[in-house]
Image: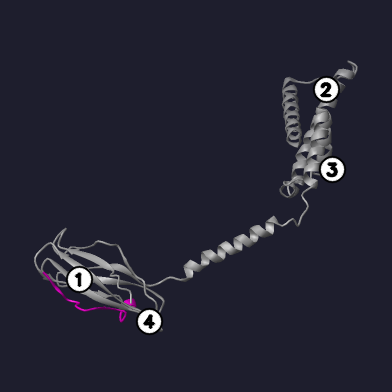
Amino acid sequence: MNLEQIFQNVIINRQEINSIEFEKENIEIPLYPGGEQTFEILITNYGSPTHIHLSVSDELKGQITFLRDNPYVLQKEYVSAVARIPQDGRVLTNGQIFITAGYGSKKKSFPVQLGKVEAKTQEPQKDELDKWEEESEELRPSRPFVAEPAKKASRSRMSGGSGFGGISASAFKNFRGGFPASSGKRTRKGTGENERFPLILALGGFLLLVSSFLLYFLLPESLQFDVSFTQSLLFSILFVTCTTYILLKFMDEI
């Protein structure tokens, strides 16, 4: 039997006539099945002497018993109660203790947890064990990682020798659909097809515009075609758009 008393202070008639207040929002009575414990509730009365009534919710009936359930309170009165859990009873029970004042005109309750929680203390240990096993599995040298820095170093030397050569190599890989072996290969694999189509379209438009400009200046005057201001403005916007998009794509590949 645990000799430690669980204490609750019930205050009546302080705010107004028959008002009920609790010093603690809830109380916990840690017991195992087959255990028993005595605790006390202090009734503090700020008004005229009166009777109060103590009762429990259906969940706690037969498990919490008051030695006096209808005490007469002058100023301060201690009410003893006994909490017990049968040998075959529930490990944890949540219920309410009700305080009734003013001969039934006011009734208020506070939560009571009867029993102990054991499952919650074991779950974190299991989670930590699983986490430790996962980390150990990741640290095992099951996959070679030596080739990865070598490819990156080779790529750096190729791009460091010539800026134009690096851009050409990147563009060539982009058209073929090949991507460098790195940690982002899996994430870019699904979007590679969608990214190549706009780039091919932009390159085609760029080459078409350049060819049109060259034809305009290389053809004889008899074969030259007239270009209006609107057409010139449209061609300029398309030319700048395609050029900017191609340069941005090449910069991403470097």
- What is the x, y in percent for residue 136? 66, 59
Marks 3 and 4 sit apart, C-alpha to C-alpha, by: 76 Å
- Residue placed under numbered mark 2 in the picture: 213
N-terminal of the two: label 4 or label 1? 4
Marks 3 and 1 sit apart, C-alpha to C-alpha, by: 83 Å
* Closer to the eye: label 3 or 1: 1
* Closer to the eye: label 2 or 4: 4
Q: Which mark is residue 176?
A: 3
Marks 1 and 2 sit apart, C-alpha to C-alpha, by: 97 Å
Q: Which mark is residue 34?
A: 4
Classify 243 as above or below 145. Answer: above
- Residue placed under numbered mark 1 in the picture: 100
Q: Can residue 3 be seen at all in this image of the molecule?
A: yes
Quadrant of image for the C terminus: top right
Q: From this viewpoint, which residue is outermost toward the left?
A: 48
Marks 4 and 1 sit apart, C-alpha to C-alpha, by: 30 Å
Q: Are marks 2 and 4 in contact (CB under 8 Å)?
A: no
Rate crowding at label 2 as few (under 14), some (14 to 19) or many (20 or more) other CA atoms within 10 Å.
few
Q: Quadrant of residue 40?
A: bottom left
